[in-house]
Image (tube, coloured by chain):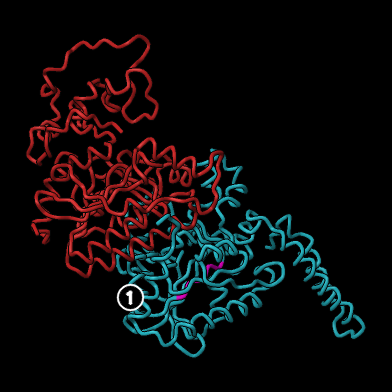
Chain colours: A cyan, B red
Amino acid sequence: MVHVLAFEKPVVDLVTRIKELRALAGADERLVGELRRLEEKSALLAREVFQNLTAHQKVQLSRHPNRPYTLDYLSRLVTDFVELHGDRRYADDSAIVAGLATYHGRSVAIVGHQKGRTTKENIERRFGSPNPEGYRKAIRIYELADRFGLPILTFIDTQGAYPGIEAEERGQAEAIAAALEVMSKLGVPVVATVIGEGGSGGALGLGVANRVIALEYSFYSVISPEGCASILWKSAEKAAEAAARLKITAPHLLELGIVDALVPEPPGGAHQDHDAAARFLDQALADTLRSLDGMDRQALREDRYRRFRGLGAHIA
Amino acid sequence: MNDAPALVNRGPISGTSLDSRLVRSGLPGLRNPELPRLVTFPEKTPAQPLDGEKRSIGKGVFGKCSNCGEVFTADHLAQHFQVCPACGQHHQLGIDAWRRLVLDGGELEMWEDHILPMDPLGFFDGKTYTARLETAQAKTRRTEAIEVGRARIDGSVVAYGCFIFAFMGGSMGSVVGERITRLFERATRDHLPVVLLHASGGARMQEGILSLMQMAKTCAALGRFREIGKPFLSVSLHPTTGGVAASTALLGDVNIAEQGALIGFAGPRVIENTLRTKLPPGFQRAEFLLSHGMVDIVTPRTELKATLSLLLKHLGGAVT
């Protein structure tokens, strides 16, 4: 299913037309020049439209149903992926995927939120909103990686931890808190990437990293714009205003020191071209991981502690 | 906010006090016999529930229990630390009363009171964040939503902190996060146990993503504190939810919950709206957490100090 947001329609229309033309043209040499011109025009139009996106529009992009999810990136970024399941306490939560993989020639541990592509899959994965078991599985993988000296790559993409009766019964708050403490003590490099939605504590449970990078149209917030609007403005309709006031888009995050680098997305957003999005991410991720080379366990711990210790704004 | 000055000479309460037995027995017959049976109110000014924010005429004179509806003089309720003498319902207790209840002589050597809030996002939601801070400061006579410092509990020196729910719902922004972090760092340096009383709606929206990061910052500081072999006694008061529940509140070496307190990650209304269902009675209450294995001890307010004291004795918080 192709979903098109109102503001991206002109870009999507043009991209679709180019695809059709290319199919029609086949090997016809005469049309190659024409196609190139159209492609350039499309890129220009995308840049124009996307330059002036509001915070709320960026939030919509970050939630776009065609946007690449953790497994879409993994299939393009890593090889030898072995998925590991379960928290050894209660269940396996498929809202978080975890495992081991080879990335640029070395073994790494992977932990990422995973949304579903179909309704069935989304019900199973709770739209990427983890239960406590998800965080406990993550903790297990963090500790495994720590013992075996593997760098950890996390991928953040969740509306937030699941607000359910059973989640509360099984200690959602404690599970997230424990993840924060465990991450803060790891003696291996940790790089977190915000690939879509960075929803509150549910995102942070994968976010206590040495470096945090964010995709151009991702966001990271203490509360969803809708949640904030309904509490502070007493109306969910004010979500657009809340999105702007909360300063949650990637450029703001960079400015506030919440993320260390931004990853550009292909024209029209990551969902227009998963391969290109993965290529851009690969570049940033490999660079970031390399920048942590040569730090020993204590240095990595200290680096991470200092990074988060410095976040906040207060007088004196 | 419901503090009455009448109590100053009374001294710290101990776990075996008459008060706590009264509360636990819950017998109406044990109510203060001096209280007149017939109380006359000023015309058209019904007693206001203790938990309500709006109290107009008659303020500070009478208080009505939000559970059983019994009416008491404010002084009488203050003597009982806002625990209803009739039914044992725990009402919100002010920050000064918490000191008197938990700390020897009610004394706290305040730390980090010079760490003050600012408005990093220039946040506006019909009112500026700066204006909201000023209102909260005037109302609570405190600089932020937590006070921390050095104190004694039955002689044991501890690093102590207590959230101030009346200050913007006890929400955690940069200052609360910074003060908790410094509390753990200082306790680590000085080899002190940490006793932290939580009461908070969660992270403070007005400081946006910076508030969220305080969760990571405080948990990292707690992580370092673990290495010195002193206990972290975490107390969750009513309510402890959201980002505060999901950081230090449930990571105590021992988790204590105040009787009846609401403790959980997602707010009950959020869950109801997501699942489109009514929640079972007692859901996310202290007793619910106890039965699900999330806290060690549920205690009435009046026994909190005795409980802390005993735990400090066992876990190496001996008098130094």
Query: Who is closer to the viewer here, B273 or B3?
Result: B3
Residue A164 in sight from this viewpoint = no
Locate residue A44, reporting x and y percent.
79, 69
Q: Quadrant of the N terminus of chain A?
A: bottom right
Locate residue B21, reporting x and y percent.
9, 34
Residue A192 part of the magenta segment: yes
Using the image, determine if residue B134 lies above or below residue B79. Answer: below
Q: Which residue is mark 1?
A: A143
Residue A133 in sight from this viewpoint = yes
Amino acid type at circle 1 is Glu
Locate residue A30, reporting x and y percent.
92, 83
SS assignment for the magenta stretch, majority: strand
Which residue is at a point 48% across and 66% down the rendered structure image? A113
Say which quarter of the image contains residue B143: top left
Question: Within 10 angstroms of label 1, few (less than 14), some, or many (20 or more) residues?
Answer: some
Residue found at the very far right of the displayed protein: A30
Which chain is indicated by disc 1? Answer: A
Q: Quadrant of the C terminus of chain A?
A: bottom left
Query: Who is closer to the viewer here, B225 or A80?
Result: B225
Residue A77 part of the magenta segment: no
Locate residue B317, reporting x and y percent.
12, 59
Q: How many marks?
A: 1
Which residue is at a point 27% across and 44% down the rendered structure image? B237
Give the secondary structure at mark 1. helix
Using the image, determine if residue B8 lies above or below residue A74. Answer: above
- Span shown in magenta: A191-195
